[in-house]
Amino acid sequence: MKYKKPKLVCVDETFLNDQSYHHMPLFEQYFNVSEFDSTQIYDSNTTFMYRTDKSRAKVKRYEGVCKFIADCVWEPYFFCSAEFDENTMGLLNRPGHNKHSRILTVPKFLWFETHFSQQDNRASINDLPFAHSKTKSFLLQMGDKRPYRVTLYNALKNKNLLTNAVYSFLAYGIGLERNFPKAEYDPTNPPFIQMAYRPEWYNSTQFTLVAENTLEDDDRKDQAYHKMIEDDGSAFITEKTMKPIMNGHPFIILGDKGMCDTLESWGFYTFPELFDRDVDNEPDLDRRIGMIVEQVAKYQHKDVKDKVMHNFNRFWDRGLVEQLMIKEMIEPILDFIKAK
């Protein structure tokens, strides 16, 4: 008997029909994907994907008949109610072991996302940064004004470590492409695209200092998700960390405790020969910032060509990425849909 693909209907914007539409070809191998049509009648074999309570309300008539997926796979928190019944699964980009049986955590999603979305950049990479002479110290890209980023920026500036760096802080009107009046910065409509890339930023610098998002910062505002996700020592990793990996650059990361352990568990190399590993294990965020700044100031070049090549090749391995997406995302969704 020919396999009948389940129906997956996107109600308003979801990761499949919005910013991550490039995942559609893979998902369409396993699902019949369509957009919600209010004039159509859907049967019980339909699963609706939505992002907000407002979107779910549009398919309220199918409660108790169909299944639902709350899509927040880009974020570590939901944009809708997380009180899910047995017919609802939540998709969340958050590390840790799930204490809520109806939430699927996909911590590698932004690896998957940048792999597919940055194919044009991949085609433009002719050689890796280690093949170029260095005229600058490090690369740092920051956008929104968050407390830990301000602390990092001020500490680097006070030690004159930004003088020879290639850096941006959009909230302060400092861009890599150009500077602009600080008052003009709108975080909902930034002046440059999120995944802005120019080879010279990497080719001219020794390493990337990644200012990651941190769950510590987010969770000061909302502790509710600790009730659903049990901390297992993993860290929240976004496209900010993927940038140096996809461009063949060494890196040091200011983010959650355990960033290096998490990346290594994903098969990537980190750089303890360049940066003291104690930074990654320091539980206090403010102290971790101070340690990062100290490591930047003490940096000494060493040959890590083999490691950055390994990371580069692993990141861009299409077969591997699709295999991981199927195992960690598609198959659990199929299991949820098929479960009685």
Image (cartoon, rainbow, N blue to C red):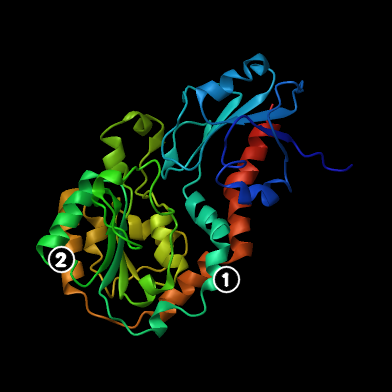
* Residue drawn at point x = 25 percent, y = 35 percent: 220
User: For this rendering, which residue is in front, 278 or 56?
Assistant: 56
| Residue kind at label 1, given as amino acid type | Ala
Mark yes or no: residue 313 visible.
Answer: yes
x and y, in percent, of residue 297 in the image: 16, 70
Residue marked by disc 2: 294
* Residue drawn at point x = 51 percent, y = 31 percent: 101
Q: In whole angstroms, how far apart are the C-alphas of marks 2 and 1?
A: 36 Å
The image quadrant of residue 176 is bottom left
Residue marked by disc 1: 123
User: For this rendering, which residue is in front, 241 or 65?
Assistant: 241
Quarter the C terminus occupies: top right
User: For this rendering, which residue is in front, 111 or 275?
Assistant: 111
| Residue kind at label 2, given as amino acid type | Glu
Q: Is residue 1 placed above or below 53 in the rendered structure?
A: below
Q: Is residue 267 placed above or below 57 in the rendered structure?
A: below
x and y, in percent, of residue 282 in the image: 21, 54
Q: How many neighbours does mark 2 have within 10 angstroms: few (below 14), some (14-19), or many (20 or more)?
A: some
First along the sequence among labels 2 and 1: 1
Q: Is residue 138 placed above or below 87 in the rendered structure?
A: below
Q: Residue furthest right?
A: 1
